[in-house]
Image (tube, rainbow, N blue to C red):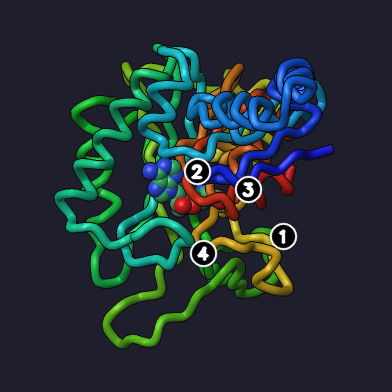
Amino acid sequence: MVFSFKRLAAPFYIGEDSPLHATWDSSCRKDTKNGKDKWWAACFDSLQNQDAPYRIVQKGGRSATFYLKDCISGMKENVSEKSVDVVVTSPPYNIGIGYGSYNDALPREKYLAWMEEVGVVIKQALSDDGSFFLNVGNKPKDQWIAWDVASVMKKHFILQNVIHWIKSIAISKADVGNYPNIAGDIAVGHFKPIVSDRFLNDCQEYIFHFTKTGDAHLDKLAVGVPYQDKTNIGRWKAAKADRRDRGNTWFIPYETIQSKSERPHPATFPVKLPEMCIKLHGDAKMVVDPFTGIGSTAVAAVGLGIPFVGFEIDKEYLDTAIARL
Ligand SMILES: C[S@@+](CC[C@H](N)C(=O)[O-])C[C@H]1O[C@@H](n2cnc3c(N)ncnc32)[C@H](O)[C@@H]1O
């Protein structure tokens, strides 16, 4: 059973899998005997507590904890120092996207100052050999956004890798030569046309991989690819299996959807993106996404059997994230 408190500024739900459910049962229900007002007051006070999660979902013995809360105060108040192995996130890009609760059109200086604050709290939460994967893209008339955001992180992190998230690509048969698997010209992936004779369609975004020291060890083969030329397996000393480093161009198309209701958020990344980041980092005991959206990182972490903590200010997005698990 799920209880809903509409009296709260943000309605609060307690599922049976939430630790708060026990509080409800043992204190709130007991207080009912002493009168309805006292009962309400006790519940109201305990649930107004901003430190309490909006919802904790248990899946396969792992928990995904969601906070309906600003990520800066949330990271400070709810995430212990150096307790997080991997952060995979995509903040608003400040390009006027129509989010439900957030105004995505701040003056550039203010936006970048905010991004820096986010970087600082992420650094506090990250373990010394942790990985912070920051996905940012540009818009046609402003090709510096991603690099401006990366630059503010420069004060606090080392940029260990730059990964190019390729959403769409065209490959001509003539350019690849004699590849048996490529029979002709191909153009694959998600292609969002723009009407312009000045700008190319934007088929990629960045995933900046920040670490504290620049020498975090990665599990590259966990996201590796098979060798095209199998003779490499014997020839290269490091090649013990049919798997090589994928490199920093990751082709990850969006999942095909039939209607907008299947992806009720204007700026998500595919689940495969955080999944690959988490696998690349290697052994992870805790994954965090400060800008949870509809929970793509949560789905990836829980799918890999890793506990997750996420923050989001929009209740509808958070409800969708919870429903996706
Ligand atoms: C680019 S989207 C993230 C989408 C997510 N990666 C996904 O795949 O669903 C950025 C999200 O940040 C949320 N947001 C904006 N300001 C926030 C804040 N101060 N704290 C937490 N979330 C915030 C927005 O509501 C939006 O859902």
User: Which quarter of the image is occupied by the C terminus?
Assistant: top right
> Image height check: is 284 above or below 205?
above
The residue that mark 3 highlights is 6
Task: Tell which tag, 4 or 1, sits nearer the viewer.
Answer: 4
Work out whether mark 2 precedes mark 4 in sequence or the reverse, and give the earlier one: 4
Q: Amino acid at mark 4?
A: Pro
Q: Vertically, is 297 above or below 200?
A: above
Amino acid type at image mark 1? Pro
**Labels 2 & 4 near each other (Cβ < 8 A):** no
Q: Amino acid at mark 2?
A: Glu
Front: mark 4 or 3: 3
Residue at 54% over, 68% down = 171
Dot placed on the residue nearer the N-terminal end, 3 or 2? 3
- Label 3 with label 2: CB-CB less than 8 Å: no
Foreground: 198 or 310? Answer: 310
In front of the other: label 1 or label 3?
3
Q: Amino acid at mark 3?
A: Lys
Location of mark 2 (residue) = 312
Counting residues from the start of the chain, the first of labels 2 and 1 encountered is: 1
Q: CA distance from mark 4 to mark 1?
A: 38 Å
Q: Residue shown at 71%/33% (left/top)?
A: 14
Q: Is residue 71 left or right of residue 117?
A: right
- Tell me the element at label 4: loop
Q: Is residue 75 above or below residue 315?
A: above
Q: Which secondary structure lies at badge 1?
A: loop
**Percent of width and height locating residue 165:** 48, 52
In this figure, which residue is indicated by the disc labeled 4?
Answer: 266
